[in-house]
Image (spheres, grey):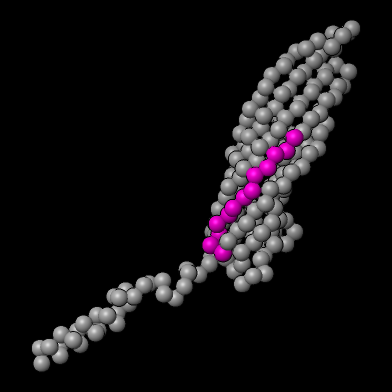
Amino acid sequence: MKMVCICIFVAVLLAMPGCGSSNNATGPEPGVLDNSYTGTLHLNFSNVFPEFDESSSVSVEVDKQGNMTFGTGTLNYSGEDDNGEMKIKRTGTLTIAPNGEYINEAGNEHFAVNENTIVNEHMQTWYWDGSAWQLYMDENITVTWNGGLIFDLDDAATTGSVCEVTNSQGSIIWTLTLSPDLVP
């Protein structure tokens, strides 16, 4: 009788979840998103004085767990202009290496993206002294853009979600465009 009770007890223990079997036997954890996505993060960088207007895009993938993987890219720009009193020349390169994450706040689904973009620029300015241009400033500028961007998932998956910043460097427009993957 003692042996029968021990055998039944061991059989019950083995049948319990977590005993003798893996907790992942039913497959991977369900996704937080209905779809995975592929698309682009597009950057348009423009300025009025001196005038330039340049664009670049990097690839982006979002898996069903909300993990974002970005490509990297560069954007080159150059502009030279004068208004009769002042002349300015800007030449630079942006190195784009974003990272981000999916966030769901009370049903509002969006992506928080750190643009992680390094700006290396050479800027020169001159002033007109009445007879010739006089060099006023000649400097190299290195700045990192890490302000953080918020993109709406629904907008990104339909028309594109846009974040725009205008500052002393110019007009900076980021657009996240995503398409749902058709593979289940």
Magenta segment includes 96? no
Residue at the farthest bottom position? 1
The quarter of the picture where the N terminus appears is bottom left
At x 61%, y 45%, the residue is: 98
Q: Quadrant of residue 84?
A: top right
* Range of magenta residues: 64-76
29 to the left or right of 86: left
At x 76%, y 26%, the residue is: 90
At x 69%, y 19%, the residue is: 139
Reply above or below: 56 against 127. Answer: below
Considering depth in this image, is 23 or 66 the residue closer to the camera? 23
Residue 173 coordinates in the image, percent (x, y): 73, 44
Residue at the farthest left position? 2
Q: How many marks?
A: 0
The quarter of the picture where the C terminus appears is bottom right
Reply above or below: 121 against 114. Answer: above
Reply above or below: 127 against 106. Answer: above
| Residue 115 visible somewhere in the drawing | no
Residue 22 coordinates in the image, percent (x, y): 36, 72
At x 29%, y 75%, the residue is: 19
Residue 117 coordinates in the image, percent (x, y): 63, 38
172 to the left or right of 18: right
Residue 179 coordinates in the image, percent (x, y): 69, 62
Considering depth in this image, is 94 or 153 the residue closer to the camera? 94
